[in-house]
Image (tube, rainbow, N blue to C red):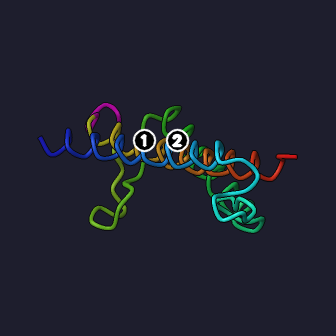
Amino acid sequence: MLTVVYYALMLLLGFVVYRHGQKLLKQGFRDENDEITKPPMGPVSFVVCGAIACVLLFGVLRALVQGQIECVGKGCAGQVYTLAENAGRFWGNVFFLVWCVLALGYGMYVSFKIWSKD
């Protein structure tokens, strides 16, 4: 039951992030206070988020190829979950990493679209 709640909350958080990004994109060049629309991240944050997303994506791809992933948390540091022995925890960690990559990528996409408006 706890796993279902975890996945539901992650999907709900993803929906909230998506709706916020869509609101920023539909807002236009200026907001309701006649100020220029600000993207969710600046240039330095854009590069840092891109680097973090690449590292996490590499971790996901490595986990899918090797069939094992290190635990993504403080309580289980150093543990390795394999697809054969701990399939539920393996896919839970892969889901979390994929969610992080998608959230960072979407934030970068929204920032780039706002910057490139003319």
Number of other residues with Cα within 10 Å of mark 1, as a class: few under 14, some 14 to 19, many 20 or more: few
Considering only vertical position in the picture, is 41 above or below 10? below
Considering only vertical position in the picture, is 99 above or below 42? above
Residue in the image at 34% along x and 43% along y? 12
Residue in the image at 35% along x and 61% along y? 73
The quadrant holding residue 35 is: bottom right
Q: Which of 61 and 78 is in front in this view?
A: 61
Q: Is residue 38 magenta?
A: no
Give percent across and percent down for residue 10. Answer: 35, 45
Find the magenta span and give its range. 82-87
Give percent across and percent down for residue 58. Answer: 61, 45
Q: Cα distance, mark 2 to mark 1?
A: 22 Å
Q: The disc labelled 1 sits on which kind of residue?
A: Phe
Labels 2 and 1: the sequence-earlier one: 1
Q: Which of 63 and 53 is in front in this view?
A: 53
Q: Disc 2 designates what residue?
A: 60
